[in-house]
Amino acid sequence: MIEIKDLVKRFGETTVLDHISFTVNKGEVLGFLGPNGAGKTTTMKIITSFWGASEGSVKIDGLEVADNSIATRKKVGYLPEMVPLYEEMRVDEYLSFIAEIRQVEKDKRKERIKTVVSMCGLEKVVDRPIEELSKGYRQRVGLAQAILHDPEILILDEPTTGLDPNQIVEIRDLIKKLGQEKTVIFSTHILSEVSATCDRVIIINNGKIVGEGSPDELTRKAGIKEYLTLAVRGEKFAVVEKIRSLDNVANVELKKFEDGVVHIEIEPTEGHDPREAVMKIVIESGWGIVEFSQKQQSLEDVFRALTK
Amino acid sequence: MNKEYFSTIYALAKKELSSYFNSPIAYIFIGAFLIVGNWLFFNSFFLVGQVSMRDYFAILPWLFLFLSPAITMRLWAEEKKSGTIEFLLTLPITDWQAVLAKFFSALIFVAVVLLLSFSLPITLANIGSLEWGPVIGGYIGGLLLAGAYLALGLFISAMTKNQIIAFILALAACFGFFVVGADFVLVSAPQFAAPVMKFLGLGSHFYNVAKGVIDTKDLFYYISFIFFFLWLNARVISQRNWQ
């Protein structure tokens, strides 16, 4: 669906994108992750043909974007970062303007606008000028505009920045719903968002792709080890020694000893789960258990490890 | 070039026009244009006592000089400042379509204003016998001149994010092009440059047309002037070299 090959973008001396290649398949939701200034927005601006590439090729449905800009733009719905909108227009005016430009057939326009308005939850504000809307509503108007012509591809640049937690969840659900039938690329630096919505993640840093895969794959690839944390009331050395002697335990590290409670981190051997054995020995030794948990493998760690 | 091509320009121009009339700018503009124009005209009208619009068309270029940059200043600068340009230029439209839409919306607006000023010749025709030839010529010349000012101003607006800068530069550029062919400039111009300057000047062509003599030379001049600056405008827009 979208094929990007050796994409390079330079502004004068600075190279913003440095030979980026990836493909997005039909129906996939791709999370585009990276610190600020990594090149996410630049990539999106090139896909939507706002900017031209310095080198490389971007193809949408086999069409080279640089040579078939109008045809490819028709396939794409785009929500730019910061959601620039025509402030003085009313929501309904704005949407019918877009419908006209986007060549939505005349007799279907009203129907289509109605559908999109209800999809994005804009019923209450359709007759209000955009400049009076809250950030959350603006974002939804931006989304409504992007999906109005029912494009196959959606490009959303940081669709949830500046929203409150409830609005974030709403927008995220909307993206998830849209992702069921459309190809979506969206950028973000909120990591929980990615694991909640994406099939695949690309992490980009300094204009280069540093990680690619499903959230799980990425965690594995980044070489981040899983840990179990255990806190028990007992004798410091006995606890460490006994647990270290278990099978499937690669290493035990004493984190802290406080008020008679031993806090340790257990690193399992690759591909094994020592949780039951640990539990058994804790009970047999009669240690009072305060905490036993598996440290969530977080994308945050992956992100930090890859973009440092 | 097909129906779709023009319906897109139409949709864009319609949006642009409705944004003029949604803001107070349009009404201030129309009010200022009619009041100042009529006042300046009637100031001398009763002294001279001639039923002729000649004086009005002498004032018209100077009115347009201030009012055209006021129309064009925001057309690109505002889009660049607010970021909507990124949205506009990722719609399935060509840069030319965007430029043409903005130009024609401004031109239509000026045409509406000129149409409203038609109360003047109608009044005059009731007072005495008005010779309509120069009046029609004056209006056509006025529209062509406005087109030239607007194309120039639009191009300048595309080069900045700041509306005030766009206004002042457009005013200066329009003034420059207007007076370069005027007699008082030509007198002090070097011999070899004078004919060229006379041809380049927006003013000299306007006064030709306003006499009621519509020469293809003048038409050609205006149309190429407008086309040239619209072309430059499209070039600037396609560069997108602003951040």
Image (tube, rainbow, N blue to C red):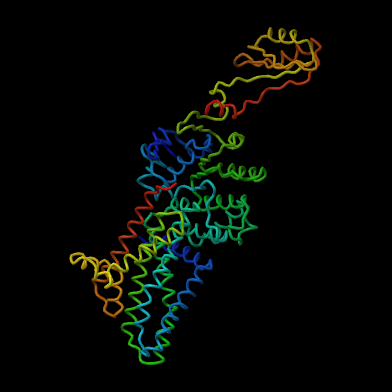
Task: Please determine whether, in this image, residue B30 is positioned above or below residue B77.
Answer: below
**Residue A250 % position (x, y):** 63, 11
Residue at 66%, 42% (x, y): give it. Answer: A165
Q: Is residue A135 left or right of residue B44?
A: right
**Residue B168 % position (x, y):** 42, 61
Q: Is residue A283 left or right of residue A255?
A: right
Total residue callouts: 0
Name the foreground residue: A158 vs A278: A158
**Residue A158 % position (x, y):** 55, 42
Name the foreground residue: A188 vs B59: B59
**Residue A197 % position (x, y):** 59, 37
Name the foreground residue: A152 vs A72: A72
Q: Is residue B172 left or right of residue A119?
A: left
Task: Please determine whether, in this image, residue A246 is positioned above or below residue A127.
Answer: above
Task: Please determine whether, in this image, residue B164 is positioned above or below residue A247.
Answer: below
Task: Please determine whether, in this image, residue B147 is positioned above or below residue A234.
Answer: below
Name the foreground residue: A307 vs A23: A307
Q: Going by the picture, which residue comes out furthest to the bottom?
A: B128
Q: Going by the picture, which residue comes out furthest to the left?
A: B192
Q: Quadrant of residue B123?
A: bottom left
Split into 4 quadrants, where in the image is the N terminus of chain A? top left
